[in-house]
Image (cartoon, rainbow, N blue to C red):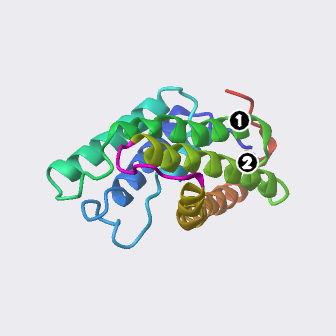
């Protein structure tokens, strides 16, 4: 993958990812949430892929938490999901961020490399959903006596849309990346290293 070596570009990417999360997270509170699905999983994957600093993860998680608390406190959004299980979002987002980090140094963002990138993304998305939704069903205290069959049924109901949204957002980022790589001289000759 073509590395983002200059810090100004990384800052702009980080700000863009934070803006995308702020615009699509929070149901009625976020400006684009009525029209676009939540981009948080894709934001964490792309942050792992493009940003060098390990501080990107806690900064984005802090932003997500502030957005959620603001949406509940001032935006009139239901606090139904704010339970002890909320902290299962740490491993949920950590999985996709880690998959992005892993991909940064090992996979090429080329037409040929995209299937492996999206396979990695799919695995990260499934694991993330297991942590997020599974954690909510098991630790929120809102589902008494949830059977394994009911849990699998809930995964079957909600996981396809989550994975589709994740793939679409990262697919759009891949299109932008490939377009810019063709437009910028020398961009294809560099290769990312594990960071």
Residue at 62 percent of width and 61 percent of height: 167
Range of magenta residues:
140-148
Q: In this view, does 21 lie to the left or right of 191?
A: left
In the image: residue 114, left or right of residue 77: right
Q: Do the residues bearing badges 2 and 1 touch, measured as CB atoms within 8 Å?
A: yes
Whether 157 is among the magenta residues is no
Q: Residues within 10 Å of mark 1 (few under 14, many from 20)?
A: some
Q: Of the numbered discs in the image, which one, if any, rests on residue 120?
A: 2
Is 128 rendered above or below residue 90?
A: below
The quadrant the C terminus occupies is: top right
Q: What element carries label 1?
A: helix
Which quadrant holds residue 26? bottom left
**Residue 18 versus residue 39: which sits nearer the camera?**
39
Magenta highlight on residue 146: yes
Toward which corner of the image does residue 29 lie, by quadrant?
A: bottom left
Corner quadrant of residue 139: top left
Identify the main secondary structure in magenta: loop
The residue tagged with tag 2: helix, strand or loop? Answer: helix
């Amino acid at each position: 993958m073509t590395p983002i070596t200059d810090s100004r570009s990384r800052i702009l990417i980080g700000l863009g990812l934070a803006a995308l999360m702020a615009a699509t997270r929070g149901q009625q509170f976020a400006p684009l949430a009525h029209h676009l699905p939540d981009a948080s999983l894709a934001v964490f994957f792309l942050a792992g892929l493009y940003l060098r600093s390990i501080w990107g993860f806690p900064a984005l998680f802090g932003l997500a938490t502030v957005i959620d608390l603001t949406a509940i406190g001032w935006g009139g959004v239901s606090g139904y999901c704010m339970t002890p299980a909320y902290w299962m979002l740490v491993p949920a987002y950590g999985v996709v961020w880690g998959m992005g980090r892993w991909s940064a140094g090992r996979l090429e963002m080329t037409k040929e490399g995209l299937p492996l990138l999206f396979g990695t993304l799919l695995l990260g998305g499934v694991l993330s959903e297991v942590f997020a939704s599974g954690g909510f069903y098991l630790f929120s205290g809102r589902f008494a006596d949830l059977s394994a069959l009911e849990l699998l049924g809930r995964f079957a109901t909600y996981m396809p849309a989550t994975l589709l949204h994740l793939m679409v957002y990262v697919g759009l980022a891949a299109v932008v990346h490939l377009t810019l790589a063709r437009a910028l001289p020398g961009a294809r000759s560099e290769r990312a290293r594990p960071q």
